[in-house]
Amino acid sequence: MSRWHHDRLPAETSRLLVLAATALARRGVEHPRQHLFLAVSPPFGEYPGCGTLLVSRDPFDEATLNRLIDHCERMKFRLVVTPRGGSWKELISALDGDLGSYIARSQLDLSPPTDDRPFFFCMLRPGTILLPPGFTDPHEIFGLYLPVISLHLLNLGMALMAIVGTLVVFWWLPRLGLSRRRCGAGIVYFVAIGVGYMLVEIGVMQRLSVFLGHPTYGIGVGLTVLLVSTGVGSLVTGWLAGGGMIRIRWVRLALLVLIVLIVLIATSITPLCLRFEGESTAVRCWLAAVLLVPLGLVMGVPFAAGMRRAGQSASAPLPLFYAANAAASVFGSTLAMLLSLSWGISASLLGGGVGYCVAWLMVPRLAEDA
């Protein structure tokens, strides 16, 4: 495995070594450095050196080490971490001692990526976004800092637009002959399900990208199944309601079932993926679809049921509720990425569950307004 190696801030090679050492430790290896060999090529023009890491299931024997060292000397590679030592004294000491303390002391997030947080190149700690750790090299600025801060600024901009837009709408409601109190519950309800839906949808697609082996499969299967099953769920909701409203207890029951499903998926999707990761791509796609269909069907109920209840009132501002839901969905898409990058995909899924909890609390108020 090869990654760029910056001597001042060797972020990529550091995390690669930590990942390899952690994987070896979980396999029962007591001395991971005996299984690791990292050498760095000389810089080439404006480009830094390239660090190449070799990982062995068994400790490197003397003959293999001699051949590797001879080759590195001929190529003028620097020996950074080897079973015999190397130039990276701090990390060698951490590998031989307490690797966890080294990770905690680092200015970057060097914790090993997992299936729940598989973002190798996202190394900024959540608390250092606005105070980056002294980046000066263009590769550090454009590779580590700008992508993450851009996402945070985008999310902040979306939040500000949503807040300002809501305040303007609330200020204008009396001029339209509408009650702020009566419209408030509807706005909160549709904002909550809009944010919740996007947090769950994007979280599912990100998790399936790892399980299915490629983001294209994750988006293709996750997005298609959720959109189709959500549409079917909304259609069935309309059929069951007939020409009247859906009872409050059925709406709240559907939301409660949805919250339980989200929590179950957030807590059990990783073990399920590990259980079936050895199956063929086609089988894994079908398994993902079977898992998502019940979730999508129930996710189709809140919007359709909410619109049907709100529509029973002649003065209900349905276009406003549509707009609130759409704006919340846009904000939720950036928020989902932010939660996944900072705390893991399960945080995005559970955040969606929180959104639906807020909607569950708003259902009685929505019914009163209708």
Image (spheres, rainbow, N blue to C red):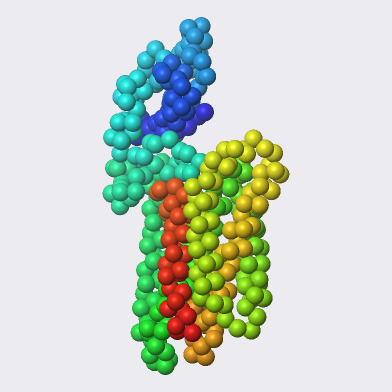
Would you say 286 lies left or right of 46 here? Answer: right
Residue 25 image-quadrant placement? top left
Which of the 4 image quadrants contains residue 83?
top left
Residue 8 percent location from the top left of the image: 33, 33
- Between 280 and 41, the residue placed more toward the observer is 280
Q: Confirm whether residue 326 shows in the render.
A: no
> Which residue is found at the position 47% from the left and 80% from the top?
367
How many marks the image carries: the answer is 0
Write down the quadrant of residue 110 in the picture: top left
| Left or right position of 42 against 237 | left
Q: Quick one: which residue is furthest to the top in this view?
A: 63
Q: Is residue 355 above or below residue 18?
A: below
Q: Is residue 252 visible?
A: yes
Q: Residue at x 42, y 44 (%)?
A: 122
Q: At 49% across and 78% down in the image, what residue appears? A: 321
Residue 57: x and y in percent read: 52, 19
Query: In the drawing, does residue 293 fall left or right of residue 91?
Result: right
Residue 274 spot, x, y in % from top left: 57, 38
Task: Give x and y (percent) for residue 55.
Answer: 50, 22
Name the residue nearer the viewer: 311 or 128.
311
Q: Is residue 130 above or below residue 23?
A: below
Q: Residue furthest front?
A: 249
- Residue shown at the point (42%, 67%) measured from the top left: 358
Question: In this image, 179 relative to 223: left or right?
Answer: left
Near-viewer residue (152 or 244):
244
Q: Is residue 22 above or below residue 277?
A: above
